Amino acid sequence: MSVAGNLPELDPEGFLVNLQDWSPQVAEYLAAQDKIKLTPEHLEIILLLRDFYQTYQLSPAMRPLTKYLRQHLAAEKTSSIYLMQLFGQSPAKALARYAGLPKPDNCL
């Protein structure tokens, strides 16, 4: 079953049912639902989150996410405040959704 034409199936919270259905276009659609227009800064972090998932097979909460980002990006791009400016009040949850990953365990 597809959602909104040829988009992959989403669960009731808006996360992909099949993780392999992710694409940058799907990320743009999911972000647009939250009134966010993805920029290169957004995509840089989304792709790093997908790398994190490939390595650890889990969607990180905020603290492990920022720790991982600090290993790959300049400090000004890894703070909670920066992520909230890009992704809203629950960056780890929004990022996981846009990256096509499962919702982090500790996110409401």
Image (cartoon, rainbow, N blue to C red):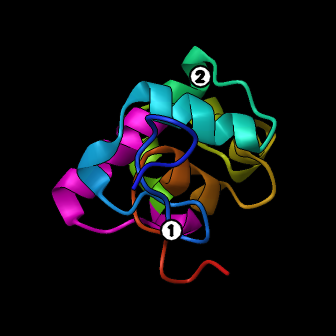
In magenta, the rendered stretch is: 46-64
Q: Is residue 74 visible?
A: no
Q: Position of residue 4 (x, y in %)?
A: 58, 41
Please name the residue shown 30% across and 58% down the image: 18
Residue denoted by label 2: 41
- Local crowd at mark 2 within 10 Å, few (<14), some, or many (≥20)? few
Q: Amino acid at mark 1?
A: Asp
Please name the residue shown 64% across and 24% down the image: 38
- Local crowd at mark 1 within 10 Å, few (<14), some, or many (≥20)? few
Please name the residue shown 47% across and 25% down the image: 25
First in sequence, mark 1 or 2: give its number: 1
Q: Is residue 48 magenta?
A: yes
**In the picture, residue 22 is in which quadrant?**
top left
Nearest to the observer: residue 82 or residue 3: 3
Q: Is residue 82 visible?
A: yes
Q: Is residue 85 magenta?
A: no
Please name the residue shown 68% across and 44% down the image: 83
How far is disc 1 from disc 2 in space, using C-alphas?
27 Å
Nearest to the observer: residue 6 or residue 91: 6
Left or right: residue 104 versus residue 58 is right
Nearest to the observer: residue 56 or residue 35: 35
Question: Mark 2: which secondary structure?
Answer: helix
Left or right: residue 79 versus residue 48 is right
- Residue 75's label in the rendered image is none
Residue denoted by label 1: 11
Q: How many marks?
A: 2
**In the picture, residue 78 is in which quadrant?**
top right
Q: Amino acid at mark 2?
A: Glu
Mark 1, mark 2: which one is toward the viewer?
Answer: 1
Q: Position of residue 94 (x, y in %)?
A: 63, 54
